[in-house]
Image (tube, helix red, strand yellow):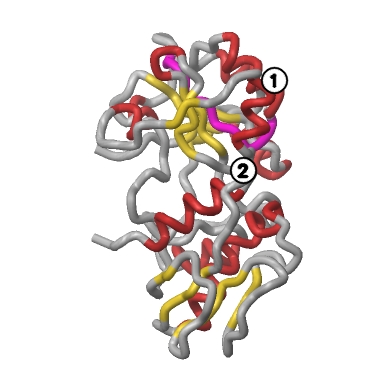
Amino acid sequence: RFNPLIVHVADFAEAEKHCVFNAEAEELARRFWPGGITLVLPRREDTPLSLLVSAGLDTVAIRVPAHETARALIKAAKRPLAAPSANPSGKVSPTCAAHVMEGLGGAPQLAFVLDGGPCPLGLESSVIGFPQGIPTLLRPGAVARDEIEKALGKPLANADTGAGEEGRASPGQLESHYAPGSPIRLNAREVAEDEVLLAFGPDAPEAKTSMNLSPSGDLGQAAANLFAMLRAIDAEARGRRIAIMPIPMTGLGEAINDRLKRAAAPRG
């Protein structure tokens, strides 16, 4: 078994050919597409999509990307594109072409890399499902919970991320994921002699080696910098532990903390 793949389409009309929208899903699509929200919806019986993208489930994870290069590729291909992150499974997500080459450059099946520039949002999409018809946040991401709840006019339920279908309906739910090579210590307010620091905000402790996700404490900037800086500080650490300062749980902080928790989890 494996996680489903997110299917990327050119527009809402194309998405309707492959899955069944309820009223709330349609509202989210019209409010946030093209953009950083993926909707997990029932497959249409007549969709030509491969069953592999659904990973044995009766749902499809689908979105319309905002990036001009991605949209141009979908239109040129004249078909939906199922696209996971372009990196070895479980490792830090790539946010530019150089990261892809670092992770997959030696892979014989990598014919070329289409470089559309750095990812402007820095985080994967937020994933919303509707188990039992209830709008549920399956994965926090590039669109904050409060923005989604404002569009719906109601709170989002939290996903059961266990081994059942709800836990498998979204990618990126492995306990250990987005992991650099160095060990991580979260919620650090001081730095040990043998640690490097990934800081946030203006009140960072002193460290011999440090980087700051956002010196001003801006969560949008921190989200955009997260994976690139995690890679960079990992390279500087050379096996030393990475101490990461606390990140507020408000707004995009929920998604940032989700990624950091998985990056710090014990690795199997």
Q: How many marks?
A: 2
Disc 1 to disc 2, C-alpha distance: 17 Å
Q: Mark 1: which amino acid?
A: Arg
Q: Secondary structure at mark 2?
A: loop
Left or right for 262, reference 141: left
Quarter of the rendering containing residue 94: bottom right
Question: Up-down: is 78 above or below 186?
Answer: above
Q: Residue at x 47, y 58 (%)?
A: 260
Q: Which is closer to the viewer, label 1 or label 2?
A: 2
Residue at image point 44% right, 31% down = 158
The quadrant of the rendering that contains the N terminus is top left
Q: Which of 155/112 is in front?
A: 155
Residue 183 horizontal/vertical position (percent): 38, 73
* 117 shown above or below 155: below
Residue closer to the observer: 245 or 236: 245
- Left or right of 154 in this view: 138: left
> Disc 2 marks which amino acid?
Ala
Q: Secondary structure at mark 1?
A: helix
Task: Quarter of the image for the C terminus: give it.
Answer: bottom left
The disc placed on residue 255 is none
Whole-percent x, y for residue 66 in the image: 70, 37
83, 252: nearer the viewer = 252
Q: Is residue 39 magenta?
A: yes
The residue shown at (63%, 30%) is 64
x 47%, y 75%: residue: 242
Would you name the residue on which mark 1 appears?
30
Q: Which residues are magenta?
A: 34-43
Q: Position of residue 44 (x, y in %)?
A: 44, 11
- 1 or 2: tag closer to the N-terminus: 1
The residue singled out by tag 2 in the image is 142
